[in-house]
Amino acid sequence: MSALKIPKLTFWRTITAIIFLAGIYACYLRFVQGWQASTNLTDTQPWGFWVGFSTLCGVGLSAGGFGLAAAVYLLGMERYRPILKASILLSFLGYTTVCMGMIYELGLPWRIWHPMIYWNPRSVLFDVALCVMTYTTVLTLEFSPSLVEKIPWKGVREFYLHWHHRALVALVLAGVLLSSMHQSFLGGLFLIAKGKVYPLWYSPYLTTMFYLSAIPAGIAMLIIALYLCVRSLNVKLEFGLLRDLSQVMGLLLAVYTVFRFLDLSRNHATQYFFVHRKETLYFWLEILLLIVVPLTLLSIKKVRNTPNLLYWTCASVVMGFMANRLNVSITAVDAMTGANYVPKWPELALTGAVITAAVVAFRLAVIYLDILPKYEQKKVRWVVSGDATAQA
Amino acid sequence: MEKRKAILVDIKRCVGCQACEQACQQSHGFPVQHPTNLNDVALTFVEQKGEKFVRRMCLHCEEPACASACLVGALQKSALGPVTYDTSKCMGCRYCMIACPQGVPKYEWSKLVPYVQKCNMCAERVQAGGKPQCVEACPVEASTFGDREELLKEAWNRIRSDSSYIPRIYGTEEFGGTDVLYISDVAFDDLGFVKPANGAQPLPNLSAAALSETPTVVLVGGSMLAALYWITQRRKDVATAEVHDKKERS
């Protein structure tokens, strides 16, 4: 009688439901009870977790899309084409998350459109806002064919795809430039706050540091997403692709490492390496997760060839990256202003809910759209070189 | 153009009566109180430092970091001197609070429609030729208002005629110069004055330096990417042509 089937109560569905419920309650606290009920933000720490995590990490971890688009369309690395759509989707959802985050981060979110008409080009944040707005549009357009190809009317579909194809290279080029700009500008935000950022993180080259760390982190995020797709969905991927991606990531991380330490010594920040302060601990935690652990692991052949271990290597990169962004925006500022900020739970819950929504959207998109190649019937996990398949 | 105005605060003269605080709070309709820090209902306050009283307020920098940071230009440096705030433009991003080296802009965290609060040197009164409320309320002329040039002369006169003053005016070059000037008979470092992180250079120069490279990077980067794309396409074309040739020959 009932055509509507109630979804089975699985572990992950329960977790998702709890996160959403907590998010809804946090939403109520933020918009009905106000800032003091929902956040620990103060005049000395006005940005906190929402800007540090939702915005800085959100944008940074979405850097995979422009990297892969550049590799395939501009550099002709055709072998990465099977994962191109997934990387665009990941970035698109990442930027959507960041834009959603603005709704609760801004004090007056209904004025989110103001930067479009009130311009202050001297402001780094203005440039970030403009780039993010434009790039989110570019990403929407880059992603759109995946939806359009599901339109049942052939005429509409082909008309759109025809014009899309012609504009694509321009879109990709614009996307690469816009991404490069705002990924660096996010670091540039803190340049003006010299004297309010602890020396281990302040540098006139914060822009470069943010750019160089965003790309490997974006790739790490992409590998994680693809790994999970293969593990939990019917996705068919050649493991060699991820292995090669991780090599690129390792190379970029090594480049970042060199520049990071050159920069630290140039800014005479090395004297703070072993100071007895809690910032020192956070600094080494960041270095450990973002640089030492992944570079060590990637140098081991077994790790590079084992999906599970590669996944954890990338997880370390992502966590190290988050540590870096939170250090710049919270640890470094707290150290100088004495804010002693610890986020309140609704801050975490709201961000968590928005990110979970993006994860659910990613999963649904992979299931219902043609994002990644899939097995016709039974899944056999990883494809290893050609037609041979293996269990990971 | 009208002459740049300024406030001169003489720490030696200040008796700590808090009349400036109260005048400010009354004129803004804030509850009258004596706070321990600047906040969204206290735009100036008198801080006791040992035996001395230091009036804290927005310094109205010549090149304000807050105005440079504000992405929608809600904060502006006016020609007369006051750094003003336009509530109709602000979107509540709070970047001004990050940018200000003194932590002057404060946020109305307790409100559901929160705005930034900061001293605007009573811009409307100054525009009409008047004085800021706080200066008018001062019974001992510890705060004086006037043309910046004149006040600088006056400050040097006081320093020269009384050897107990520190021979320095805070605000002549700090943060690239400010329109609130301080003189004192106790070293500024001991009174909790912020040591400018960028010396006499205005803080906005730091972000300007990074932004100025953008056009070059975009132009060079854009051309390089376009060139890479061209090479990629050319290679593909050559490869297809070669395959085609081979087929024809056989």
Image (spheres, coloured by chain):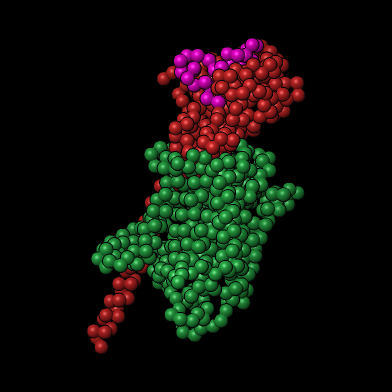
Give how far across and how far down residue B130 sits, in percent.
50, 14
Magenta span has B138? yes
- Left of B112 or right of it: where is B215? left
Q: In the figure, the green chain has which letter?
A: A
Q: Nearer the viewer, residue B157 or A217?
A: A217
Q: Nearer the viewer, residue A298 or A18?
A: A18
Q: Nearer the viewer, residue A336 or A147?
A: A147
Q: Is residue A215 above or below residue B62?
A: below
Magenta span has B159? no
Q: Is residue A76 above or below residue B68?
A: below
- Left of A13 or right of it: where is A3? left
Q: Nearer the viewer, residue A176 or A252?
A: A176
User: Which residue corresponds to the image point at 54% horizontal and 67% vertical from the top-left?
Assistant: A224
- Left of B221 or right of it: where is A31? right
Give how far across and how far down residue B5 sits, in percent.
51, 19
Q: Which colour denotes chain B?
A: red
Give how far across and how far down residue B43 sits, in percent.
59, 26
The C terminus of chain A lies in which quarter of the figure?
bottom right
User: Which residue corresponds to the image point at 46% horizontal and 18% vertical from the top-left?
Assistant: B127
User: Which residue corresponds to the image point at 26% horizontal and 81% vertical from the top-left?
Assistant: B245
- Left of A132 or right of it: where is A342? right
Q: Which residues are magenta?
A: B119-143
Q: Is residue A292 above or below residue B193?
A: below
The N terminus of chain A lies in which quarter of the figure?
bottom left
Q: Is residue A275 above or below residue A5?
A: above
- Residue A240 visible in rendering: no
Quadrant housing residue B154: top right
Give how far across and how far down residue B156 sits, in percent.
61, 16
Quadrant housing residue B168: top right
- Residue B87 visible in rendering: yes
